[in-house]
Image (cartoon, rainbow, N blue to C red):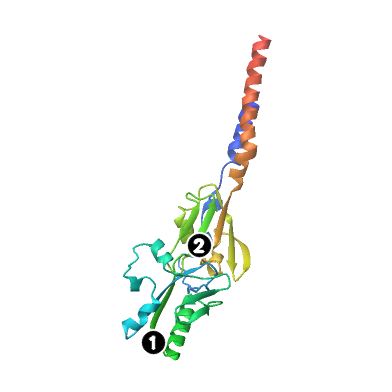
Amino acid sequence: MKLKINALSLLVLVMSCASKKDIHYLQNIDADVTQKVNYQSSTIQPNDILKITVESVVPEAASPYNRGVNQGMVPQNLQLLQLDGYLVSLNNTIDFPVLGEISVANKTTIQLAQHLKDRLEAEGHLTEANINVRLINAKFTILGEVNQPGTYNFTEQNITLLQALGYAGDLTINGTREDILLSREVDGVRKVTHIDLTNADFMNSEYYFIKPNDMIVVNQNEPRVKQAGFISNVSTVLTIASLALSVTILLTR
């Protein structure tokens, strides 16, 4: 009986182990490879908050377009910046001073800046305008087997999937590297894809850089799933078997 219990314990131990193949990233990457990085520009989406800064050769002429500035306010943090920003409506528009309702559909922040510059100059509102548009509520969410799941803000123009995982403290040892789930909504269309972090090929895909509002889910790997279900039951079985053996010995004395 003791031999059977030891054998079962050994089986449980083997089944709960993960190999290097399960946990190493980018296993097929060449250490000496050189590739061009294709940066991406995201289009503006509903509920985005934009910080639009307008400058001109005549500063007074540009002040009506700069929210908060003409009241002498200098935002000290991201929350205050967002309160003074332009919220994109569900119809992909913003209400801009003097020009009125402006469509931002299918435009990047750079394209919107150019569009505003062209209109303000063409319609005689400003001379030699300099306009900067930034998205100030960019965020992504990571759930599952990471050390710090949650929603994270970022201000960079481009961050990679690996950087996003770094925000969350990396995957735990129980996270599956071969099947990261990424859900993305762009222009009213939801795309869901599965990414294998052990394979470097994803670095050349459209999902290498994440986009605002991406949802990343890291599921439990197979050993962890077994430990949560089958293996915990085995522990119970071993306890019962040990108790039964003790009772048997006592009754046969």
Look at the image and tell me whether residue 2 can be seen.
Answer: no
- Give SS at disc 2: helix
Please provide percent x and percent y for residue 144: 55, 50
Please provide percent x and percent y for residue 51: 42, 71
What is the distance, in whole Å, between disc 2 and disc 1 at their CAs?
41 Å
Vertical relation: 2 (above or below) 87: above
Vertical relation: 188 (above or below) 234: below
Please provide percent x and percent y for residue 98: 45, 81
- Give SS at disc 1: loop
Q: How many marks?
A: 2
Nearer-N-terminus badge (2/1): 1
x 45%, y 80%: residue? 113
Please provide percent x and percent y for residue 70: 34, 74
Q: Which residue is mark 2?
A: 161
Residue 119 falls left or right of residue 105: left
Between residues 62 and 200, which one lies in front from this camera angle? 62
| Three-letter amino acid code at the position of disc 2 | Leu
- Label 1 neighbour load within 10 Å: few <14, some 14-19, many 20+: many
| Residue 12 in which image quadrant | top right
Whether residues under marks 2 and 1 lie with C-beta atoms below 8 angstroms apart, the answer is: no
Between residues 99 and 145, which one lies in front from this camera angle? 99
Residue 66 falls left or right of residue 100: left
x 55%, y 58%: residue? 216
| Three-letter amino acid code at the position of disc 1 | Leu
Say which quadrant the N terminus sits in: top right
Vertical relation: 13 (above or below) 208: above
Q: Which residue is mark 1?
A: 126
